[in-house]
Amino acid sequence: MAEVAPPARDAQVSRLLAAAEALFYARGVQAVGMDEIRAGSGISLKRIYQLFRTKSDLLLAVLERRDTRWREDLETFVDRAPDAERVSAIFDWLHDWFQAPGFHGCAWINTFGELGGTDAAVVESVQAHKRAFHAFVTRAAVESGYPTAVAPALCLLAEGAIVNASINGDPAQALVAKEAAALLRSRSDRH
Amino acid sequence: MAEVAPPARDAQVSRLLAAAEALFYARGVQAVGMDEIRAGSGISLKRIYQLFRTKSDLLLAVLERRDTRWREDLETFVDRAPDAERVSAIFDWLHDWFQAPGFHGCAWINTFGELGGTDAAVVESVQAHKRAFHAFVTRAAVESGYPTAVAPALCLLAEGAIVNASINGDPAQALVAKEAAALLRSRSDRH
DNA sequence: CAAGGTGGAGAACGATCGTTCTCTACGTGC
DNA sequence: GCACGTAGAGAACGATCGTTCTCCACCTTG
């Protein structure tokens, strides 16, 4: 018997996911070998395969953990802003994120690009993240006084900013999106 | 001597690039083996490696060929529209593209997601494509009577539409972008 | 101490992949 | 006919990778 105490197990899972996330995000999934994840996390291969059945399972757990953290960070930041400025706050947060060291685009878009054609579970995970993100943008849009009908366009601006910022290495794409969003609001104000 | 006649060589290169493009686009670069490209193109491995030094070189040629064709198709379509409707025409063209069988997102965004962290030549190729695409959007914006300052926002809408359409499988994202673009124009008119 | 379960280090396995090589056949120029 | 360069088919090579296995040290419980 003598099962490992759950807290110790959780700490190992956490270290493992953190190391795998950093490696996957920086270089892609297929470019990172399990042995590198072992070296980065300090968890032996044997233990890794006790915690996750396959590399693919590990990847899904990494995506889920990142989704939780990423959206918590975003929502915490945005919810501190007054209602009317919440959409602006989203783009301010993106602007900060684009400037963070090691920024390399959207982990879900990247993973979708790499494995979207072959791994159905990855596709579902990416879709779930985008659904949740867009739902939050829509909520913020309503709180900021946008008509609901404009929310999808704000999502486009956000996704476009993420893509362009990572490909061009240009954080200011967030400000372009922010200004366009403001234009969309003042226009729809008149109705 | 007896070198292969250039026309024959060109035909082989063309078949090779077409087969590689279809496979890479559908399933990703790393998921496709060189032997599959051989089977798909009917060109022997030996000949493939005479035409391209490495798989990476082949990929770059595929991206370049696709860039030329993709932008030619877009520009041909858009330039048929009256000046004032060229931006709308861009989104109409995207809408058609999103509905084409086998649509799987932007080949450059996908490749960037897969190899952007490890292959500098790929990054450069993707950046070049996006630069050219955004330059065309800017030209169309000016022709359509948008102030130049709004053009970057139109690029965001286009990129966002491509990303969302591929992840959600929702071609209508192009229409969302088209409407938002129209709003941006009517709003910026007042300045 | 004894027994047994647990985990670490790393070798081993089996598969796959990019790339090259071998062998053979064919067409061309002298 | 003969030498030569070329190409096709596919085996072979060397590396890498995901996954499992071996061996041993350690800890716990009685």
Image (tube, coloured by chain):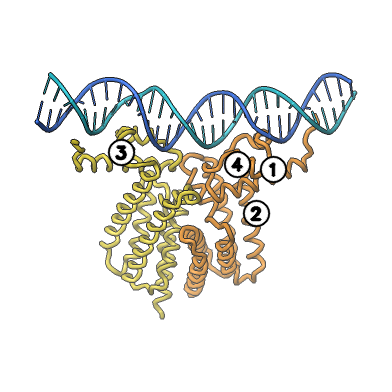
Chain colours: A yellow, B orange, C cyan, D blue
- Write down the residue under mark 3: A50
- The disc at residue B13 is 1
Q: Which amino acid does label 1 sit on?
A: Val
User: In the rendered view, would you say B142 is above or below A190?
Assistant: above
Nearest to the observer: residue B171 or residue B85 = B171
Residue A153, quarter of picture:
bottom left
- In front: mark 2 or mark 1? 1
Q: Which residue is at 58% across, 65% downward?
A: B96
Q: What residue type is labelled 3?
A: Gln
Chain letter for mark 1: B
User: In the rendered view, would you say B173 is above or below A31?
Assistant: below
- In front: mark 4 or mark 1? 4
Per the model, the C-alpha gap separating discs 3 and 1 is: 48 Å
Is there a contact, CB below 8 Å, between mark 2 and mark 1? no
- The disc at residue B145 is none
Q: Which residue is at 38% across, 63% downward?
A: A134
Mark 1 or mark 2, which is nearer the start of the sequence? 1
Chain letter for mark 3: A
Tag 2 and tag 1 share a subunit: yes
Per the model, the C-alpha gap separating discs 2 and 4 is: 23 Å
Q: SS for tag 2?
A: helix
Which quadrant does the C terminus of chain A fall into? Answer: bottom left
- Write down the residue under mark 4: B36
Per the model, the C-alpha gap separating discs 3 and 2 is: 49 Å
Mark 4 or mark 2, which is nearer the start of the sequence? 4
- Write down the residue under mark 2: B69
Q: What residue type is labelled 2?
A: Arg
